Image: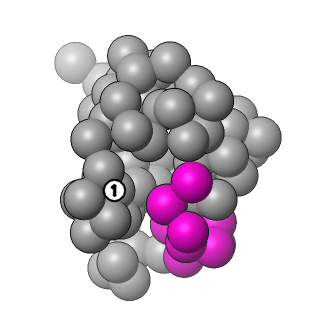
Amino acid sequence: MKSKPVSRRIFAENLRKARHAKGFSQEDLAELADLHRTYVGSVERAERNVSIDNMERLAAAVGVPLPALLQEGKR
């Protein structure tokens, strides 16, 4: 089994932490970002090669600058 790319994993972990900090469910986040709930779940599991556009939408929805969601150990 291949390991997931490091940046994808970092983004996924930081997004999940930011979502929990806001008290959002995956469904809440999906609605705010205008994305599907299952898509958000797969992003948080680092299964998706998420586009920069969707990364920006998710970052805006949780109120965290996108660069912060890409920094290891920052959230």
Main secondary structure found in the magenta portion: helix
- Which quadrant: the C terminus? bottom left
Query: Which is more toward the observer, 7 or 52?
Result: 52
Vertical position of residue 48 compared to residue 67: above or below: above
Q: Residues within 10 Å of mark 1 (few under 14, many from 20)?
A: many
- Which quadrant: the N terminus? top left
Residue 57 lies in the magenta stretch? no
The percent coordinates of residue 59 (x first, y second) are: 59, 58
Q: Residue at x 40, y 55 (%)?
A: 15
Vertical position of residue 11 compared to residue 50: above or below: below
The percent coordinates of residue 2 (x first, y second) are: 30, 24
For badge 1, the amino acid type reads Arg
Q: Is residue 40 left or right of residue 31?
A: left
Vertical position of residue 74 compared to residue 6: above or below: below
Vertical position of residue 43 compared to residue 32: above or below: above
Which residue, given by chain and number where applicable, does mark 1 sit on?
A: 19
Q: Residue at x 32, y 65 (%)?
A: 22
Q: Residue at x 34, y 56 (%)?
A: 19
- Quarter assignment of residue 35: top right
- Label 1's element? helix
Q: In the image, which residues are magenta?
A: 61-70
